[in-house]
Amino acid sequence: VARHRIAVLPGDGIGPEIMNVTLEVLRTAGRRFDVEWEFLEAPIGGAAIDAAGDPLPVETLSLCRRAEAVLLACVGGPKWDNLSSKQRPEAGLLRLRKELEAFANLRPVRTFSQLLDASPLKSELVAGVDLIIVRELTGDVYFGEPRGIEFIPEGNGEREAFNTMLYRESEIDRVAKVAFELAMTRPRRKLCSVDKANVLETSMLWRSRVSTMAASYPDVEFSSMYVDNAAMQLVRYPKQFDVVLTGNMFGDILSDEASMISGSLGMLPSASLGDGTFPAIYEPIHGSAPDIAGQNKANPMACILSATLMLRYSLNRPDMADAIELAITNVLDQGYRTADIMSAGKRLCNCSEIGDKILEALQESAVSR
Ligand code: NAD
Ligand code: IPM
Ligand code: MN
């Protein structure tokens, strides 16, 4: 029997609902593949603020450090929206990424043939899309100092707010290397770096470092694109993209946009990787969905698919990842859909029902192996 110790952070909103389903899927896969799980659960985000007064309590961080990988659902919610930037739920997630030096966030975007009609884009445009966004995750305007909201001296009580967009060459280089190496493993070997080098110094430095690195990857078909154009090209003709490398904020925005190629934000997983010193974090790209939280309506697939990325990248169990992905494919083939990917003629399921269907499919495919 193999044993794996995983830090489990359900977080807020729909987080506990989708994490429950994800853990059930992992347990079922574990029984089939002789893997014993040690799930170490801890609060993060709003749940941790309520329990311990801190969106990332030291206990949660040290538990993450002791695990082989971190599985995280999502944080945030209206209840905590008026806290200062350092005390908000989101600050806990940002600190976790920083502490674990998870600088490369891989966000694969693919279409499921069963979900072509769930995308608002034309089927022929999205069919066959297979791209991956490599988003820098521990720098940029998210972390740059100084930042703040202050009264303007002699401003008659008027305030101003400021953030600092900042990248060091070493920060650009390490994430660019991840993206080039990844491009080398893919059939098309294309890499498009997205920036705003016509306006921003951070992007000028970004473009020059990434272009320099491109010279040492002659097999990679390299290009750079401005972010405004990239946002347009993603919906005009998404199949042109293979690996998309970009900074923290542009990557955040472009990946939510790109999720609609798959049909829903609820389908997109991610892996937040460092250099191997600390455990990686696996997290859906979506948030806590306050509008549907507590209603058992959420799509757990982004979270489950994040767990399959964990099986591939951190636990070296592609066999288990394949089995879980096959189970998801079977469930989609059978026409089961959560509300976010629902379309005519399909069978509406809630979060736990779609979870049960995935468990059944996982068990059946084991029997018919
Ligand atoms: P959101 O991603 O939570 O939701 C956007 C829309 O997508 C909503 O209509 C929601 O219902 C829907 N949606 C998202 N995930 C879904 C799923 N799995 N199944 C079905 N529908 C889904 O973004 P938001 O509303 O802008 O933010 C809500 C909160 O989440 C905020 O506090 C924000 O800071 C936080 N947030 C957290 C993360 C994270 O933890 N990684 C990511 C994004 C936003
Ligand atoms: C994401 C989220 C986070 C981000 C927030 C909640 C800090 O939007 O994971 O995409 O902006 O990185
Ligand atoms: Mn986001």
Image: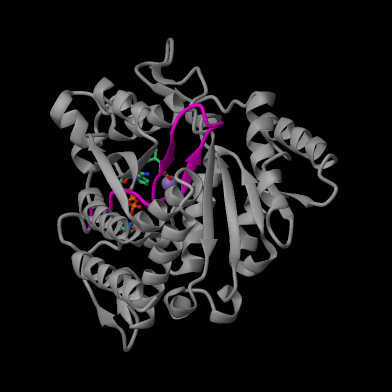
Estimate the x, y position of residue 158 in percent, counting from the top left.
Answer: 38, 21
Residue 349 is one of the magenta-drawn residues: no
**Left or right: where 357 falls relative to 155:** left
- Is the residue 142 above or below the residue 214 in the image? above
Q: Nearer the viewer, residue 322 or 152?
A: 322
Main SS category, magenta section:
loop
Q: Nearer the viewer, residue 334 or 47?
A: 334
Q: Nearer the viewer, residue 197 or 168?
A: 168
Q: Looking at the image, which residue sits at the far top? A: 153
Estimate the x, y position of residue 29 in percent, counting from the top left.
Answer: 32, 59
Estimate the x, y position of residue 33 in percent, counting from the top left.
Answer: 35, 58
Highlighted range, magenta: 270-291
**Left or right: where 213 falls relative to 99:** right
Q: Is residue 242 visible?
A: yes
Q: Looking at the image, which residue sits at the far front? A: 1
Q: Nearer the viewer, residue 134 or 365?
A: 365
